[in-house]
Image (spheres, rainbow, N blue to C red):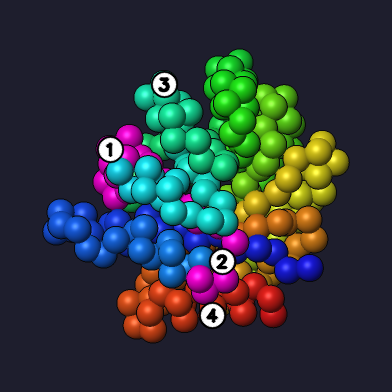
Amino acid sequence: MSAKLGVNVDHIATIREARKIREPDPVTAALIAELAGCHGITAHLREDKRHIQDRDIRLLRGTVTTKLNLKIAPTAEMLQFATNVQPDLVTLVSENRQEITTEGGLNVTAKIDELAKFVMTLKSNDIAVCVFIEPETEQVKAAKKIGADFVEFNTGKYAAACDLGSIQEVDREVSAIEDMTVLARKYGLRVLAGHGLNYRNVGAIAAIEGIEEINVGHSIVSRAVFVGMEKAVKEMLEAIRR
C-alpha cells in the first residue's frame, strides 16, 4: 500500500505575503489539493507569521475534509492557539526566527519534561501529536517517552544528498530512515516523513515500509506555478505510487 500524501500550503501564503494582499489563498489551494486526491493538508503557523496567518488556520479548520496537520513550535502561545482551533494533528517542530526554512528536527531528548506536559495538554483536548525529529535512536525513544502518537522523520539530509548526487550518502540516509521506522513502529509510534522532498526523490522514501504519509510543500507549489495545483498534486501522487 502506497504512502499517503499530505500537502503543505505554506508557500501559497508565502507568495501572498510578498504583497500583503488576499491572493493567492492557501485555503483555496487546500481545497484544490483535496479534490486532486491528497490525504491531508499541512500548514506551519510560525511565531513570526511570515506566511500562514491565524485566520488561515481557522479557515482551514472549517473547510479541510481530510485531515488538518498544524505544525507549531512548542510555545505557550501556540499551545493555546492549537487547543482553540482543534486540528486533527499537531506536529511539534524546532523553529529559529532567522532560518529560511526548518533547519532540523526538534531535539526531544533535551526537553523531555517540558514536551511531555505540552503533549499531555494537546491529547487531553483530543488532538493527536507528532514530533518532527531526526531519524536517530535517542530521538525516537524520547518521542515515545513524551507520549507522542506519531513521529515525522526529517528527510532534509536525504534530499540534500540527492541534490549533490552522493550515492553513498543517499543510501546512508535511506537506511537510517528505514531502521528508525522499524524502531518507531516497535514502540507503537506511527511514522510520517518530509522536508525537501520533490518529484525526483520522493519515491525512495515513499517505498519504505511503515511510512504512512509523506508531507510535501515547496515542490508542489513550485510545480503548480507552471501546471496548476490540481495537476501538481496528481503528479506527486503518481511519483509516490511508482
Residue 201 image point, x, y percent: 59, 72
Which residue is at the far right? Answer: 186
Instruction: State whether the magenta stretch is mostly helix, strand or loop.
Output: loop
In the rendered view, does 58 fall on the left or right side of 117?
A: left
Disc 3 marks which residue? Answer: 76
In the rendered view, does 209 fall on the left or right side of 78?
A: right
For badge 3, the amino acid type reads Ala
- Residue lying at 47% horizontally and 81% vertically, measured from the top left: 231
Q: Which numbered disc, 1 or 4, marks the residue that appears first in the sequence?
A: 1
For badge 2, the amino acid type reads Cys
Q: Which numbered disc, 2 or 3, marks the residue that appears first in the sequence?
A: 2
For badge 4, the amino acid type reads Glu
Q: CA distance from mark 2 to mark 4?
A: 11 Å
**Within 10 angstroms of label 3, few (less than 14), some, or many (20 or more) residues?**
few
**The magenta stretch spans residue 50:** yes
Q: CA distance from mark 3 to mark 1?
A: 14 Å
Disc 2 marks which residue? Answer: 38
Residue 129 image point, x, y percent: 61, 35
* Mark seen at residue 205: none
Q: CA distance from mark 1 to mark 2?
A: 28 Å
Q: Is residue 177 above or below residue 4?
A: above
Q: CA distance from mark 3 to mark 4?
A: 38 Å
Disc 1 marks which residue? Answer: 48
